[in-house]
Amino acid sequence: MADVVVVYHSGYGHTQRMAQAVAEGANALLLAIDAEGNLPAGGWETLAGADAIIFGTPTYMGSVSWQFKKFADASSKPWYVQAWKDKVAAGFTNSAGMSGDKLSTLNTLFALAMQHGMIWVSQGLKPANTKAAKRDDVNYLVSYSGAMAHSPADASPAEMSPGDLETARLFGERVAGIAGRLHG
């Protein structure tokens, strides 16, 4: 079994709930970026030992949160020694808007992974894009490059779409499966 780490920032708890679903599917360790943009003690070492790193961040103003950006910038130290080269990578995001420029955030996570020489894993799910589709269907937001969730601005984390959370869980399962095949 591959060692998978979900490293994420959550501003209001929605992205944390999504991270938990991804981690459940991947049987992964959760590594939270704090409100100041820092990892907990031993965080960098945990990432160094992982076979796969799944990045998670809310989408704020069309991109990653500043706390996630601080983490990404600090990853230049492992980048310099190619510490994450050939690790499996993937990403997920959440925003209050149904679209909310989430693809822009996933593209930022993809670019970070590519700079590190990582191997990106796509969503791998068919979209729920028919007239019969319901809001709580898996991959209702129709993402191919990573998992997406929508949380209305006045909704609590407990009110997140079960379909979005199942999408996140299935995504984590896919990433772990691929990491296991590549690094197992």
Image (cartoon, rainbow, N blue to C red):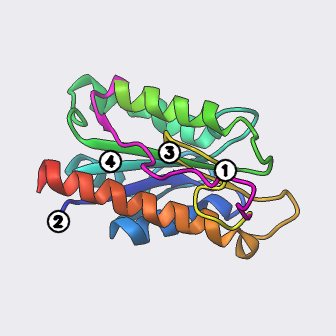
Instruction: Tell me which secondary structure the magenta stretch mostly adopts.
Output: loop
* Residue found at x 82% / y 58%: 152
* Residue found at x 45% / y 48%: 123
Lower sequence index among marks 4 and 3: 4
- Between label 1 and label 2, give the one nearer the viewer: 1
Q: Residue beneath label 4, please?
A: 44
Q: Residue beneath label 3, please?
A: 146
- Between label 1 and label 3, give the one nearer the viewer: 1
Residue 15, by quadrant, is bottom right
Q: Residue beneath label 1, please?
A: 129
Type of amino acid under label 1:
Asn
Q: CA distance from mark 4 to mark 2?
A: 21 Å
- Between label 4 and label 2, give the one nearer the viewer: 2
Where are the magenta residues, as a range?
Answer: 115-134
Lower sequence index among marks 1 and 2: 2
Lower sequence index among marks 2 and 3: 2
Q: CA distance from mark 4 to mark 3?
A: 23 Å
Q: Position of residue 36 (x, y in %)?
A: 60, 47
Question: In this view of the protein, can residue 104 be seen by the observer?
Answer: yes
Q: Residue beneath label 2, please?
A: 1
Q: Nearer the viewer, residue 26 or 37?
A: 26
Secondary structure beneath label 1: loop
Q: Position of residue 66 (x, y in %)?
A: 64, 37
* Residue found at x 42% / y 72%: 24
Which residue, as the protein is rendered here, is positioned at the far bottom?
Answer: 158
Direction from residue 46 to residue 128 in the image, left or right = right
